[in-house]
Amino acid sequence: MFRDTIGTRGQAFVGVFFFFGLVAMFSSNLRQVNWRTIGWGVAIQVILALLVLKVPFVNQMFTAAKVVIVSFIDFSDRGAEFVFGNLARPGDLALNPGKEFLFIFAFKALPPILFVSAFFTVLYHYGILQRCVRWMARGMVHLMGTSGAETLSVSANVFMGQTEAPLIVKPYVPRMTNSELFALMASGMAHISGGMMVVYINYGADPVAVLSTCIMACPCSLYLAKLFMPELGKPETAGAVQTQSEKSPYVNGIDAAAGGTADGLRLALNVGAMLIVFIAFVAMADALLDLLRKGLSLQKILGWIFSPAAFLMGIEVADISKVGSLLGAKLAINEHYAYLVMKGWKATAGYMSDRSYVLTAFALTGFANFASVGIQLGGIGAMAPDRRHDLARLGLKALFVGFIATLLNAAVAGLLI
């Protein structure tokens, strides 16, 4: 009855306040929160959402960006087809009538990681990526009053992964305050890398949703991090966007492309290996649960647990448990598994509404899963070995805030769509 009264937009409106309030409830020191940071962060997030979802010109720009991303996939496919032949062209193999066609993940989803990783490394070598990041960070530092180092790292997460983005401010990481370090970690959980952006869209996720939530997560993750853990110290880069210029480790663009390819290969192998293992664990868990109770599965349990979160995103009542299971799968396993499950659902006409698919893309686009805690501990810990204790202590808290940031982005979109 309540749901029928307020409608899906009403659900999302309640969700915006609930998700914000949940982070505030667990704040380490609510009295020390800089409400200027929170206010401007919320304003920037909402303005970005309005521009993308309600202003035709901006929406058309983001839609046009889909063409660019699809082109990247096409470029990657050319290379994959040369190496893998027909295996990189799944349609060539779907020649057996009556057989279920399965998405060939290794030959279709992983090659774009290699190309995009190399592309961004070349941009980094020539300093183009750093200039884009500084341009984005200057506005937030001025408006939100955050430190230059943390804001640069948060801005870099729009393009780079959770362990690559901190490289922009690597010299400052060992001396960051706990609040700065937490913002750096939480933002990494709430974002994805450029390479993963292409992969998720290749899975069939709505391109505008993936692009816009990556940008919205920039102010959202930063103000939620400052709400959860307010700044109590004196940041070294307070009020200034500055970085110690580091010489590129690469000799030239070709060397950068080769280095980026090697990094992308490690990432692609890691993604593939994790999917094999985690999906095997899911299958084992489903078999054990089915023994306990016929028809019981991990998907059903996750659906029950995370249905309230799906409701507060503004999901239609018929799709709430389905989206809830995807949210749980993303947190417990990873977003790749959740996106691939959703890709399978899309093949079934009418399984979920288009609106539910779009809002789910907002919520799934982020690295907020338990494995990321270990990834950050290893990646960021290598930059600041003396801060490993702090990283380990903050890891699960950053996961919580990063996950809530993706839900809050989805709720804001649910309010406007």
Image: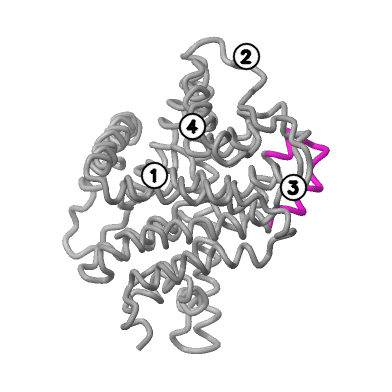
In three-dimensional space, the C-alpha distance between marks 1 and 3, rounded to whole angstroms, equals 28 Å
Identify the main secondary structure in magenta: helix
Q: Earlier in the sequence, mark 1 or mark 3?
A: 1
Q: Compared with residue 404, is residue 66 higher up or lower down, i.e. above or below? A: above
Q: Earlier in the sequence, mark 3 or mark 2?
A: 2
In three-dimensional space, the C-alpha distance between marks 2 and 1, rounded to whole angstroms, equals 30 Å
Closer to us: mark 2 or mark 1?
A: 2
- At horizontal 61% and vertical 54% (from top left) the residue drawn is 371
Q: Compared with residue 225, is residue 317 higher up or lower down, i.e. above or below? A: below
Kindly indicate the quadrant of the structure image that contains residue 338.
bottom left
Residue 410 makes an appearance in the image: yes
Q: Position of residue 376 (x, y in %)?
A: 66, 45
| Kind of element beneath mark 3 | helix
In three-dimensional space, the C-alpha distance between marks 1 and 4, rounded to whole angstroms, equals 24 Å
Kindly indicate the quadrant of the structure image that contains residue 228.
bottom right
**Does the magenta-highlighted stretch encompass residue 288?**
no
Q: Amino acid at mark 2?
A: Lys
Residue labelled with disc 3: 391
Q: Which mark is residue 247?
A: 2
Q: Which mark is residue 199?
A: 1
Q: Position of residue 6 (x, y in %)?
A: 34, 78
| Kind of element beneath mark 4 | helix
Q: Which mark is residue 136?
A: 4
In three-dimensional space, the C-alpha distance between marks 2 and 4, rounded to whole angstroms, equals 22 Å
Q: Amino acid at mark 3?
A: Leu
Q: Are marks 3 and 2 in contact (CB under 8 Å)?
A: no
Q: Earlier in the sequence, mark 3 or mark 4?
A: 4
Left or right? Give the position of 337 relative to 395: left
**Residue bounds of the magenta highlight:** 380-396
